[in-house]
Amino acid sequence: MESINVAVRQHETGLGAGEWTLPISDKENVDLKILSETVYRFFDLFNAEWFSSQLPAPLVTFKPTGRGTLGHFRPGRNEIGAKLEVNINTAHLNRPLLLIITTVLHEMIHLAQYASPDLHGRDSYRSNYHNAKFREKAAALGVPSSGWGVTTGVGDTFKTF
């Protein structure tokens, strides 16, 4: 794992409870330390279970993006210099944790296609983003996706895991 990713992960998960919160409604805040720990833990579990621990660990971020976007995978250096980023859109942190975690898995499939295009079916990063191989892998893991990238449900494979 890249050293900046390690440092940020250690910082985020090492904060005290309540030190890093974000309002998600007039009455409720989300503790981003707890959410960060949870997202990283599921990343590690999914990576071991479904990707043979071969995916490079990205930096996980929580930033606002377009309202219709639940998250995104970004290769290359981000604004702090970290390579490989999975972002969870803060506009959707009020969703159930199950749905946030499905977004993480969806973005991991993009990461897999980027990291191993021959294995996971992608000619280049920009070509055919939610191609048939992506949709096939997503369905097999229980997070089926449309060609537009919309997760269309939660399947048995994911629920069983």
Image (tube, grey):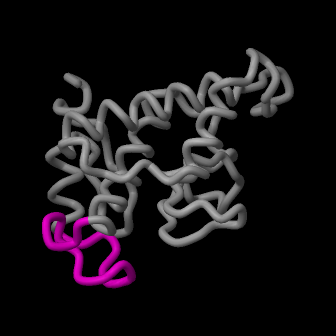
Residue nearer the viewer, 133 or 58: 58
Residue 1 in the image: state x and y as whole percent. 44, 49
Residue appearing at x 55%, y 42% in the figure: 6
Relative to the observer, which residue lies in front, 31 or 148? 31
Residue 138 lies, in percent from the top left, at 23, 52
Residue 85 shown left or right of residue 110 in the figure:
right
Q: Furthest-front residue in view?
A: 3
- Residue at 36% x, 78% y: name it: 125
Numbered range of the magenta stretch: 116-132
Residue at 42 percent of width and 48 percent of height: 57
Lateral position of residue 21 relative to residue 108, left or right: right
Question: Taking 34 as reference, is 36 above or below it?
Answer: below
**Left or right of 134, for residue 74:** right
Specify whether residue 118 is painted magenta.
yes
Image position of 147 (left or right of 63): left
- Residue 143 vs residue 19, the one in the foreground: 19
- 138 or 20, which lies in front? 20
